Image: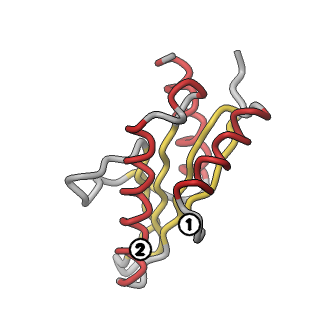
Amino acid sequence: MAELHEAILLRVRRKFLRGGTREAKNPMPTYRPDVFAQTVSSGGKISREVLVEAEIESTLFSDHTAEQLVLMDEYIGHRKKHSVPVKGYLAVPKKKTCVSNAKSLLTSLFPGGSKISVLAVSINN
């Protein structure tokens, strides 16, 4: 299980690091996402942040996952007040049932909508 989680993280890191973001130290002591990356302008201002929480199919509906997603949503709302665009992702293996379950989880946690999207990651076994 840990290997699958690490494989998801490896693919996600590769995707965002190629896009110009760089991993950074997370500024929140209570919430530690699996990947925290920022795009910083030449003037030193943060122009974009990316948060990724990676989950495998068996841990998708755990209490820990729900807590992490709620904290991620709170962080996104907090940063929005400071005019920093933040995008949150729930990265899951690219299986039809897993992606469907992840979307269902986000809908049930945030009925009014959220800035968190499901990111389906294909893993080469």
Is the C terminus in the top left, top right, bottom left or bottom right quadrant?
top right
Q: Which residue matches tag 1? A: 114
1 or 103, which is in the foreground?
103
- Snapshot quadrant of residue 57: top right
Q: Which of disc 1 and disc 2 is earlier in sequence?
A: 2
Question: Residue at point 37% right, 81% down?
Answer: 43
- Snapshot quadrant of residue 83: bottom left
Residue type pointed to by label 1: Ser
Position of residue 11 in the picture relative to residue 31 (left or right): right
Q: Quick check: 73 above or below 119?
A: below
The residue carrying pointer 1 sits among few (fewer than 14), some (14 to 19) or many (20 or more) residues within 10 Å by Cα, namely some
Q: Which residue matches tag 2? A: 77
For label 1, the SS is loop
Q: CA distance from mark 2 to mark 1?
A: 9 Å
Question: Residue at point 50% right, 29% down?
Answer: 59
15 or 79, which is in the foreground?
79
Report x, y in % for residue 8: 57, 32
Question: Residue at point 43% right, 68% down?
Answer: 76
